[in-house]
Amino acid sequence: MPSRLGPWSISRRRSWPLALLCAVQGCERFAFLAMLPLFVPYAQERHAMSVPTALMVVAILQALSYLAGLPGGWLADRRLGARASTMLGALLLALSYVLLAINLSSLFWPALGLMVLGHSVFRPGLHVLIAHATGNDEHARERGFLWHYLAANLGYAAGALFGEWAHATRGWATLFCGSAVASWLSAILLGLGLSRLQLDGSEPDATGAAQPTAQPHSNMAAVWLICSVAVVFWLTTQQAGSSLAVFATTNTQQHITLSSRSMHLGPGHFAALHGWMVIVLLPVFLHLHGRQQEHRVPMASLLIWGYVATTAAFAVMTTASLLGSDSSRVSSAWLIGCYLLLSIAEILLAPLGMSLVTRLAPRDKAARAVGLWFASSAVGNGLAALLALGWDRWPHHRYFAVLALVSLAAAAALYRRRPALG
């Protein structure tokens, strides 16, 4: 009888490849987030862009990086294989940061183009590797993607801090050199670990047509459903940097008293609080997830609860807006409660949604399924931009009520199809 795994474990044979891939993801997020928050002032200072133009460029950059995951996933499935795809993506990303560090106007657009290409093959390949590194056990795969998400968030937080330090003390060249070093490190880690990944069977064959596709739970229709509904998740996630940030500035009391000390809370503090909530809650969820091996909650139910938590988060904001009206301020507790619910929803929907997508997809279409998941992010970002046009035209409570209703509709859509989701 196999021994029972502890709540934090994967398996000794699988833990080393998973740790390697988590480190690779952490390095990539570190590199990208060191640059992203400061892209607008960089474009202003070094390339004479106006703020609206720079904002448009960074929005298009992110949208193309996600949408390009579809052809990138096809390339990983049919030509390169997941390992080569991930390695190529890491090298292209490193080269893009090197070109930005050189700081020539003629290299600016080629650098952004290489960044889009790098993400297009890196993301699908890496997520397929993680799925195969954790084996066929569904519970181990879910834990693997939770660990991966924790590594990504730690890289996110560390990269943002590094970017602020590098820009303030050393300048733009140091910032981009740091991003390049982190990307080179991810490529080096992959290079050193490729043989071990192959021995552990974590690399699917690049010629997917030769693979049998009749696997248990292989259902591209279900993958399409999950990715279509995920548009709502990405739409609501984007509110942290848009409507919720504006609400924090104009409609939230910006001082909180703790132990007789008054503290100022601005929109940046609320955004950072949201990030740290995710980082703190992820280990807690990992522990709880590991303890429920015998009485597992179906994955579809966890996703449904994620959308229910999102519904509750924006119901909280709807109530706060009704109580305070659009011209007055309410307690910061409303916004903190909203961010807490959104953090819970993010943990349930982002890593576990990706885990389910890789499990349901046929083996020869796994990278394309991952690309579809990221394409839903681009659509969600676009819808968030369109919805933002209604912020000044609608009462705040109506704006947040729309988000609550679409989240509830997403939960209902998954509830109706939960038997097909396994």
Image: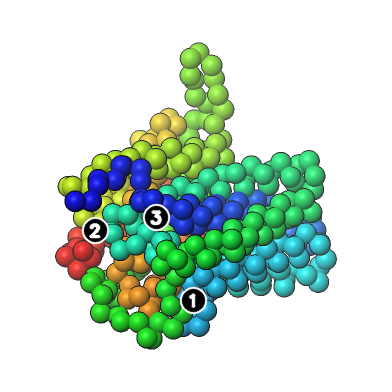
Secondary structure found at label 3: helix
Residue drawn at (24%, 58%), measured in percent from left and top?
300
The answer to whether the residue labelled 2 contacts the one labelled 1, judged by CB atoms less than 8 Å apart, is no
Q: For the residue carrying disc 2, how many other residues have a C-alpha within 10 Å: few (<14), some (14-19), or many (20+)?
A: many
- Res 372 seen here: no
Q: Is residue 265 shown above or below 361?
A: above
**Circle 2 — which element?**
helix
Which circle's residue, 1 or 3, is located before the other in the chain?
3
What residue is at 26 percent from the left and 52 percent from the top?
A: 302
Q: Identify the disc placed on residue 13.
A: 3
Name, please, the residue furthest toward the bottom: 209
Pointer 3 or 2: first along the chain? 3
Discs 1/3, front: 3
Q: Is residue 400 left or right of residue 27?
A: left
* Depth order, front residue of 90/207: 207
Can you name the residue that lies furthest to the top here? Answer: 260
Q: CA distance from mark 3 to mark 2?
A: 28 Å
**Which mark is on residue 300?**
2
Where residue 81 is drawn, which disc sits there? 1
Residue in front for this viewpoint, 141 or 418: 141
The quadrant the C terminus occupies is bottom left
